[in-house]
Each structure stands twice: as structure tokens, then as C-alpha cells.
Amino acid sequence: MSKSPYDTKKITPSLYGDRSPVEGKVVAILHINFKDRGLKLIDTKSRAVLKHEIHEIMITDEKKVAPGGGADRVAAVAFFEIKKGGLIVTGDKVTAAGTKIGDLVGYDENHMPNHLGIILWAPTLDEPALTVGDMIVFHRPG
């Protein structure tokens, strides 16, 4: 797990200022649920993602999941390819085909450099209705 060079208590989403949405397209659907994943989130609250990279969307329904923490109840739901790169930040609202699927809570680097695990909070581990080709968008809150 990498350590952030910043005091994560002082770095809040409001410090990032205006930024454009990050967009991607679902390239694979997953149906994997864990009750004891032992997922370890990195300390960092933001990640730059580049066009053409492929990353994984995972969801958790555990409350208080945050950078530097962890999660056991996790569902791996999809891989997506970045179509419009940029900066994603914890607290971002994430939609698929225009429907909210969760709020960005952190990142898992377990499979790097192959792909980043992008962790969303959702009220349930039920799989969101995703289809290959759906657009995933990370929206700045507010």
C-alpha cells in the first residue's frame, strides 16, 4: 500500500476546484461478491486516469469506507476503458448509462500495474444494471 505524501485530514474534495467529468465505457461485466475480501484502500483521495486505461469498478455497502481504510463486503461489477481522462476524487458521483451507481470512496492498487480498483459506496451490493458499452461518468459533487 502506498502512503500519501499529504495529510489526508487536510485534503478535502473542495480543495480540487473545478474539473471536467471523467468518462469511460464498460468493456466487461463481472459477477463476483466477497463477504471477507480484506480490501485495503490506499491513502490517496484522488487519482489521475488516462485515456485508454482499463480499470475495475467495485462496490461496497459498508459505511465509513475511506482512503487508508478497508472493506470486506465488496462486489466486483465491471471493467471499463477511460474515454475522456482526468482527475477522479473521493466523493465523486458515479453514473452508468445516466443512472447513479455509487459514490467514489477510494482505490485499491492490489492489481497494479494491470488495473486500478475503483471503489464505490452503494446502499446495497446488488449488481447495478450494467451492459457492455454503457458509459461510466465520474461527476464532481455539487
Image (spheres, rainbow, N blue to C red):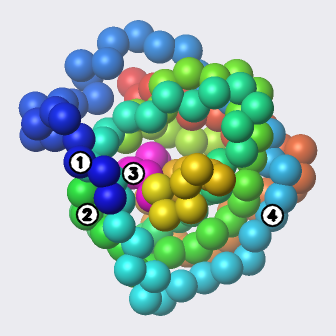
The residue positioned 38% from the left and 34% from the top of the image is 46
- Relative placement, left or right, of 13 versus 96 is left
Q: Amino acid at mark 4?
A: Ile
Q: Position of residue 141 (x, y in %)?
A: 41, 29
- Relative placement, left or right, of 69 versus 58 is left
Badge 2 is on which residue? 69
Q: Give the foreground label among 4 and 1.
A: 1
| Magenta span includes 118 | no
Badge 1 is on which residue? 3
Badge 4 is on which residue? 29
| Callout 3–callout 2 Cβ contact below 8 Å | yes
First in sequence: mark 1 vs mark 2: 1
Q: How far apart are labels 4 and 1 at the CA level? A: 31 Å
Q: Amino acid at mark 1?
A: Lys
First in sequence: mark 4 vs mark 2: 4
| Magenta span includes 103 | yes
Q: Amino acid at mark 3?
A: Gly
